[in-house]
Image (cartoon, helix red, strand yellow):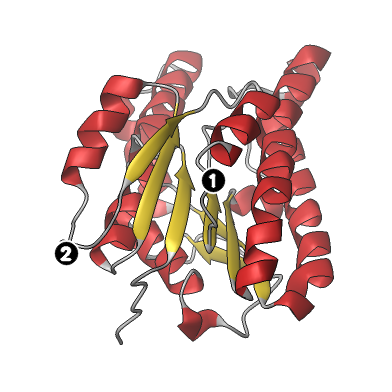
Amino acid sequence: MNLNLTNKNALVCGSTAGIGKATALVLAQEGANVTLAARNEDKLKAVLSELSNNGSQKHSYVLADFTNPLQVAQAVAATKNHYHILINNTGGPPGGAIVDADVSAFAKAFTQHLQTNHLLVQTVIPGMKELGYGRIINVISTSVKQPLDGLGVSNTIRGAVANWSKTLANELGSFGITVNNVLPGATATGRLSEIIQNKAKKTGKTIEEIETAMQNASPAKRFAQPEEVANAITFLASERASYINGINVPVDGGRTKSL
């Protein structure tokens, strides 16, 4: 299946590592013009140099600190691009039991995830409406279907983002704009390594023991690779997914117990 994203402009947040970087690479392979967004300029330049280019693609980047939603939105608006595709993606909140979480952790995560997502959507929606084409894809977590132990703040905020997304899907569908969530399971990224290391410290188990237990929780008996999640995101970003709207798509090897 040729997804053919030629002449489509895609904004990919958190695109210097992990799922965000993998998504940027796959979108570029499918012909999209990719704008990277992250806060480390050296890493942005490095990823920019890795993006496929058929000779006519125009790739770029914007500096964006997702703890400052207004700055992110202003940086994107300054590109003056009409974006067909928006990938909302940023690192998750620190782990820990919810009962021990400081109230400020909820406010920080809400700002970084929901408020930033919202301002970005408000920035790109006028262009999407003008184009008659829009794909908004939020990279969240399987915790919106099944809360994960030890990720109390993340579980809470991810659920808020999922409901915000569904509401948007209802409001924007008539404009040719779809809004969907991709829910990665345990994926081989720096974020997963941090979670494993924290679990090892708290439980006294070895990293290998933690990894094995997490892999065995999935019928696939392994971690996902970032590009496997990126492939699902890229399909949802394409014209082929025009009638898929307002859903959560787990990419977790079957780990989530609910349908």
Q: In the image shown, does 239 or 78 lie closer to the viewer?
A: 78
Q: Position of residue 182 (x, y in %)?
A: 55, 59
Estimate how packed mark 1 is, as few (under 14), some (14 to 19) or many (20 or more) residues with alpha carbons within 10 Å.
few
SS under mark 1:
loop
Give, as a three-letter code, the residue at label 2: Asn
What is the x, y in percent for residue 248?
Answer: 64, 65
Name the residue that disc number 1 marks.
Answer: 80
Question: In the figure, is residue 71 to the left or right of 3?
Answer: right
- 166 displayed left or right of 244: right
Residue 196 in the image: state x and y as whole percent.
Answer: 41, 28
Q: Residue at x 79, y 61 (%)?
A: 168
SS label for mark 2: loop
Which of the two marks, 1 or 2, is nearer to us in this view? 1
Looking at the image, residue 97 sits to the left or right of residue 191; the answer is right
Q: Compare residues 152 and 14 and report the one nearer the observer.
A: 14
Identity of the residue drawn at 68% across and 46% down: 123
Instruction: Quarter of the image for the N terminus: give it.
Output: bottom left
Quarter in which the C terminus is drawn: bottom right
Which badge, 1 or 2, comes first in the chain's sequence?
A: 2
Q: Nearer the viewer, residue 139 or 71?
A: 71
Q: Looking at the rendering, which quadrant does residue 201 occupy?
A: top left
The span from disc 1 to disc 2 (Cα, nearest Å) is 23 Å
* Numbered badge on residue 250: none
User: 115 above or below 85?
Assistant: above
Amino acid at circle 1: Lys
Determine which quarter of the picture holds residue 160: top right
Q: Position of residue 167 (x, y in %)?
A: 83, 61
The residue shown at (34%, 51%) is: 24
Quarter of the rendering containing residue 72:
top right
Could you say which is closer to the camera, residue 139 or residue 98? 139
The residue at which mark 2 appears reads as: 54
